[in-house]
Image (cartoon, rainbow, N blue to C red):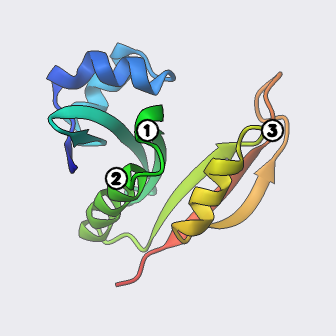
C-alpha cells in the first residue's frame, strides 16, 4: 500500500468516497495538496482530507473503503498527514467524530493512534448527533 497526494484524475473517486464535499469544494483542496489517497495494487482504498487551522494545524477527515478497514490504511494516511504537519511547523493534528451507536470502531481507532478527546459539542447542527473532538500532539 502507498499514500500520495490526490490528483484531479482522482476526483470522481474522492467525491464518491468523501460524501461531504462537492466538486467546487474538493477541486481546490486537491490543488492545494490537502487531500491524500491511499492505494492498494494501484486502486484507491482510502482518503484523508484536511483543513488547516491557524495556518498550520491539520483538521482531518478520513475515509477508508470498507473492505480495507483494519489493514493499516487509516494509520498510513495519518502518518502521511503528520509528516506534512511537521513540515509546516505544526505540533498537533485535530479530528472529530459524530457520535452514535455505530462509532465504536472510529473511537477505538482514534485512541489507538494516540488521539485524546478534548470536548464534545451537542447540537452543533440541527438534527445531528453530538460531535467529539480529538487532538494528537506530534512528537518531534
Residue in view at x 28 percent, y 58 percent = 80
**Which of labels 1 and 2 is toward the front?**
1
Could you tell me if residue 121 is visible in this image?
Answer: yes
Residue in view at x 65 percent, y 45 percent = 97
Q: Position of 93 compared to 77: left or right? A: right
Read off the residue under disc 1: 64
Determine the CA span between mark 2 and mark 3.
25 Å
Front residue of 129/51: it is: 129
- Disc 1 and disc 2 in contact, CB within 8 angstroms: yes
Where, quadrant-wise, is the C terminus in this rendering? bottom left
* For residue 122, above or below residue 133: above
Mark 3 secondary-structure assignment: loop
Read off the residue under disc 3: 101
Which label's residue is closer to the chain start, 1 or 3? 1
- The 10 Å Cα crowd at callout 2, few under 14, some 14 to 19, many 20 or more, is many
Percent position of residue 25, x then y: 38, 22
Which label's residue is closer to the chain start, 2 or 3? 2
Point out which mark residue 77 bears: 2
Percent position of residue 18, x then y: 44, 27
Amino acid at each position: 500500500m502507498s499514500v500520495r497526494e490526490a490528483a484531479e484524475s482522482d476526483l470522481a473517486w474522492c467525491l464518491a468516497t468523501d460524501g461531504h464535499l462537492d466538486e467546487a469544494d474538493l477541486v481546490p483542496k486537491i490543488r492545494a495538496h490537502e487531500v491524500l489517497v491511499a492505494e492498494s495494487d494501484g486502486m484507491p482504498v482510502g482518503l484523508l482530507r484536511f483543513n488547516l487551522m491557524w495556518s498550520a494545524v491539520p483538521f482531518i477527515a478520513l475515509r477508508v473503503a470498507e473492505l480495507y478497514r483494519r489493514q493499516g490504511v487509516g494509520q498510513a494516511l495519518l502518518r502521511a498527514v503528520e509528516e506534512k504537519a511537521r513540515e509546516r511547523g505544526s505540533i498537533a493534528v485535530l479530528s472529530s467524530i459524530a457520535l452514535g451507536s455505530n462509532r465504536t470502531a472510529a473511537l477505538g481507532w482514534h485512541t489507538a493512534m494516540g488521539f485524546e478527546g478534548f470536548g464534545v459539542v451537542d447540537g452543533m447542527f440541527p438534527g445531528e448527533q453530538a460531535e467529539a473532538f480529538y487532538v494528537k500532539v506530534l512528537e518531534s
